[in-house]
Image: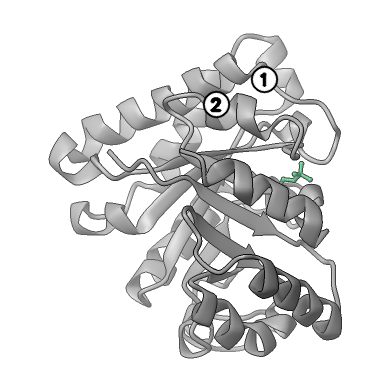
Amino acid sequence: MISKKFIAANWKMNKTIAQSNEFVSDCICKNQDLKCDVLICPTSLSIPTIIDKCHSLGIYVGAQNCHWENSGAFTGEISAPMLADAGVDYVILGHSERRIYFGETDEIISKKVDNALKNKLKIILCVGETQERRDCGKASQTVINQVKTTLDIVQKSDIKNVIIAYEPVWAIGTGKTIVPSDADKMCDDIKTFVTSKYGSECTQDFRVLYGGSINSQNAKSFLDLPSIDGALIGGASLEAKEFLKIINIAENY
Ligand code: PGA
């Protein structure tokens, strides 16, 4: 079991190149020896500017999406080999904003996961239920089904390159948070499913993050729980001081 927590920033469609650079410089000044894993996912445009600085500090860099094909006539898209060539470590796939605004289904996400893994990228796979599914008592069924479908083609040898982020759709960017023990239970259910699919020898280091309105005030109540290995943070990751506070909390485990 991994004890180091994993803190990931999802900047979404925010920050110019200059702003991204400034944020990383602030992190570099204030954090020399990180005691937790940190990932920053800026827009693809900012990746080349910050990647060397991040890597020199031991911070991973991720993209927020990629296509399922390596190249071709897909206007506006970016492919996994392009990200790998740029030195990217992780790619977020299946975020609920991609599912809602860009029509991504579990089947599409599964193809993206497959191609990204073939290109040696690590995956942050996002899953989560809507308010409606939670209200009708189907939260766990929905989430496990998403995990099952999107991991369908992932081989035993590759599961070590996948992190799952449990993000209830209704908690993203809304300021509403789930009761931490409910999030812990869902993360535990995900681990149980993944372990039953791949075997405990392959999943000892498997991590599940929680995401949805995490900030420096509530981070500890989630990170304290045994099945929550870290956090995927949107809004609260945009300001260096606030993000550093969360990192400092995560360094205490
Ligand atoms: P939030 O976003 O922290 O702003 O709720 C989380 C996410 O979308 O990953």
Image vertical order of residue 178 relative to residue 39, above or below: above
Residue drawn at (48%, 72%) of the image: 58
Q: Which residue is mark 2?
A: 142
Residue drawn at (58%, 71%) of the image: 66
Residue drawn at (85%, 32%) of the image: 175
Disc assigned to residue 133: 1
Q: Secondary structure at mark 2?
A: helix
Q: Residues within 10 Å of mark 1 (few under 14, many from 20)?
A: some
Q: Is mark 2 within 8 Å of ligand 1?
A: no
Q: Position of residue 38 (x, y in %)?
A: 54, 59
Left/right of residue 58 with respect to residue 99 in the rendered view: left
Looking at this view, is 222 or 195 the one in front?
Answer: 222
Looking at this view, is 181 or 155 the one in front?
Answer: 181
Q: CA distance from mark 2 to mark 1?
A: 7 Å
Image vertical order of residue 252 relative to residue 46, above or below: above
Looking at this view, is 232 or 194 the one in front?
Answer: 232
Residue 141 visible in this rendered orientation of the protein: no
Q: Amino acid at mark 2?
A: Thr
Left/right of residue 15 with respect to residue 226 in the rendered view: right
Q: Residues within 10 Å of mark 2 (few under 14, many from 20)?
A: some
Q: Quadrant of the N terminus?
A: top left
Mark 1 or mark 2, which is nearer the start of the sequence? 1
Q: Secondary structure at mark 1?
A: helix
Whether label 2 touches label 1, CB < 8 Å: yes
